[in-house]
Image (tube, rainbow, N blue to C red):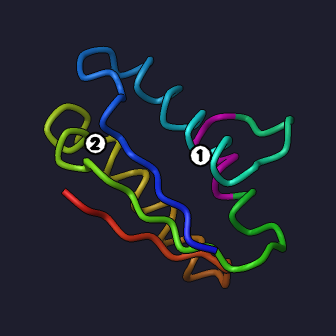
Amino acid sequence: MLVTIDFGSVDKYDEGKARLQVHDLLKTHLKFPDYYGCNLDALYDVLLDPHDPWTVRFLNCRLMWENHALYMEDLKETFADAAAEGAAVSAEWYA
């Protein structure tokens, strides 16, 4: 399943708010369970849960890199680590 997530509406100034918005986008578009914890550890766990293969296409990443670079690096690493562990997920990052 191809899922497109657009970071264009994510807060540019408040990193805490931006993190919550990112996890809300992930939860909504990937149909995560209600108990999803909205943090990178919970994301990793959900990515490893059995599911049909996902290709997640992230748009407007440049905005996130410019405003929340450390969090973007952690987010990318979480997807890469889950894929390396055998999760049925791949991520594409577009400016």
User: What numbered label is drawn on residue 26?
Assistant: 1
Residue type, label 1: Leu
Q: Which residues are magenta?
A: 38-44
Q: Residue at x 45, y 70 (%)?
A: 91
- The C terminus: image quadrant: bottom left
Residue 58 is a magenta residue? no
Residue 24 position (above or below residue 61): above
So how many labels did they put on this image?
Answer: 2
Residues marked 2 and 1 touching at CB (< 8 Å): no
Q: Residue at x 57, y 78 (%)?
A: 83
Closer to the camera in the image, 59 or 72 = 59
- The N terminus: image quadrant: bottom right
Closer to the camera in the image, 36 or 53 = 53
Assess disc 2: are there few (<14), some (14-19) or many (≥20) residues with their C-alpha within 10 Å of its C-alpha: few
Q: Residue at x 70, y 46 (%)?
A: 42
x, y percentage for residue 37? 73, 35
Q: Residue at x 67, y 84 (%)?
A: 86
Residue type, label 2: Leu
Left or right for 50, reference 92: right
Residue 39 is a magenta residue? yes
Q: Earlier in the sequence, mark 2 or mark 1?
A: 1
Between label 2 and label 1, give the one nearer the viewer: 1
Assess disc 1: are there few (<14), some (14-19) or many (≥20) residues with their C-alpha within 10 Å of its C-alpha: some
Residue 31 position (above or below residue 9): below
Predominant SS along the magenta part: helix
x, y percentage for residue 90? 51, 76
Left or right for 55, reference 42: left
SS class of the residue under badge 2?
helix
User: Can you identify the residue that label 2 sits on?
Assistant: 70
User: What numbered label is drawn on residue 75?
Assistant: none
x, y percentage for residue 18? 40, 25
